[in-house]
Amino acid sequence: MIFKTLLSQALSRPATNKFPAKYMPRSILGFLAKVQEGKARIHPPVPVPPKFRGKLAYDREKCIGCQLCIRVCPAKVIEFLPEVKKIRIHVARCTFCAQCVDACPTNALSATPEFLLADTDRNSPNLIVE
Ligand code: SF4
Ligand code: SF4
């Protein structure tokens, strides 16, 4: 049984791909320089499945400031901006549960396929949605 499993896994295609380079480059900076020169290509990530819950998108115009999203957020990552009656989402602490998306009465919130969110600064513009 174990031999059968080993054999089938050895012969099947990997479920993931190597990212960002097909093989580990000797120098990451050298690899990125080659990418800029068009001599190397960043390996694209695998496509996300349908209904994937990635980084949130916020349509500020549609938001009526009802704060329902804030009430349902289990991670408490949505901040209310009283002066403008809008919200700010701190994506670094988001669990991507999409409860805010389901609760929003005006469809101002949606989950996007974006998942490459690694950053050294939790307050970088890429991790703040407003
Ligand atoms: S996806 Fe979940 S954790 Fe993230 S902001 Fe919405 S309710 Fe909060
Ligand atoms: S639930 Fe929707 S409309 Fe209400 S504050 Fe949140 S984003 Fe705005």
Image: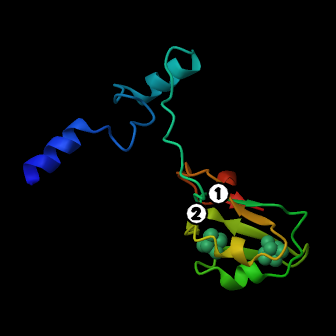
Q: Secondary structure at mark 2?
A: helix
Is 77 left, or right, of 9 in this rendering?
right
Residue 109 location (% of width, % of height): 75, 66
Residue 120 % position (x, y): 53, 52
Closest to the observer: 122 or 103?
103
Residue 56 in picture, x, y percent from top left = 68, 61
Q: Residue 92 has which mark?
A: 2
Which of 14 and 70 lies nearest the eye of the viewer? 14
Please tell me which residue is depicted at 57% across the width and 68% down the height of the picture: 93
Q: Amino acid at mark 1?
A: Leu
Given contact means CB atoms under 8 Å apart, are the residues at marks 2 and 1 in contact?
A: yes
CA gap between label 2 and label 1 equals: 6 Å
Label 2: few (<14), some or many (≥20) within 10 Å? some
Q: Is residue 19 left or right of residue 126?
A: left
Judged from the image, the secondary structure of the residue bearing numbered disc 1 is helix
Determine which quarter of the picture holds residue 67: bottom right
- Give neighbour class at mark 1: few <14, some 14-19, many 20+ (Cα, 10 Å): many
The residue shown at (50%, 18%) is 34
Residue shown at 54%/49% (left/top)?
48
Q: Which mark is residue 110?
A: none
Q: Which residue is mark 1?
A: 127
Task: Tell me the residue at 39%/43% (across/down).
Answer: 16
Is 49 drawn above or below residue 95 in the view shown?
above
Image vertical order of residue 35 relative to residue 68, above or below: above
Q: In the rendered structure, which amino acid carries the disc numbered 2?
A: Ala
